[in-house]
Image: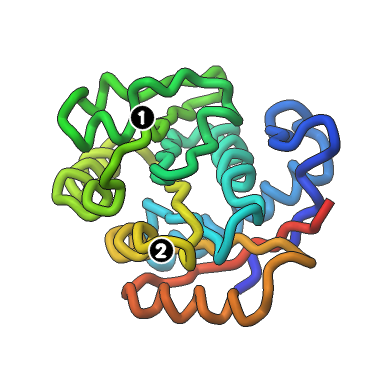
Amino acid sequence: MILKKLRSLTNKNQKRNLITFSNPESIITEEFRTIRTNIQFSSEQKRTKTILMTSPSLQEGKSTTVANLAVSMAQQKEKVLIIDADLRNPRIHSIFKLENSIGLSSVLTNRNWFEEAIKETNIGKLEILTSGPIPDNPTELLGSNVFSRLLEAASQTYDVILIDSPPVLEVSDTKLLANQCKSVILVLRHGKSKVDKAIEAKKVLKIAKAELIGVIINERS
């Protein structure tokens, strides 16, 4: 199911625009509301709370899409958590202008408690677990029982958990994450994402026993 085709989220001066927060009356913000509604209907049927968001390859607008969708959900009074699980090339802390010395990797290596690593925002009930310092062994950390327990604990506190993961065809990290999260949204960029890569990404997710609940297509700027 195509959740929505999005107009470009970027411009020459602001590559990672949090438009749902800066311009809540814009057409793009309304498009994110539509995506949010579509996901809610899907979630009611499948009892989905934790959603992994990925893309076939790099630079397809995945992290920006995660951030704007989370803001849209938080504006509807939902308690939302973003987890930046891209431990190789994290972006969420940059989008929200957050400090990143403590985050997911810190929790997974038992350096900090989950509660210590969570960062609040001034956007509704949106909270963020940034990536933390880039580790030497991201695949092992994301496939660990510690990460599984973290997701289980978070699901008791938050209405929705959006996980920003690495591109599914680039590294094996996303396959491990997809298996744990089950529900996945694939982000594509019109004019950049190749059809064969999108098909391959769908196959990889199926092998990981994850359910692709929808696709978001970004228009290229």
The disc, 1 or 2, on the residue closer to the chain's N-terminal end is 1
Name the residue: 39% across, 66% down: 46
- Reading the image, the residue beneath label 2 is 183
Q: Is residue 121 in view from this perspective? A: yes
- Reading the image, the residue beneath label 1 is 133
Q: Please identify, in this view, whether the residue under mark 1 or under mark 2 is nearer the observer.
A: 1
Dot 1: element: loop
Dot 2: element: strand
Give residue 193's quadrant in the image.
bottom right
Name the residue: 55% across, 18% down: 122
Q: Position of residue 220 (x, y in %)?
A: 80, 56
Left or right of 135 in this view: 201:
right
Q: Is residue 44 in view from this perspective? A: no
Q: CA distance from mark 1 to mark 2?
A: 27 Å
Give residue 111's quadrant in the image.
top left
Q: Position of residue 17 (x, y in %)?
A: 72, 34
Left or right of 187 in this view: 165:
left
Amino acid type, label 1: Pro
Q: Position of residue 153 (x, y in %)?
A: 21, 40
Amino acid type, label 2: Ser
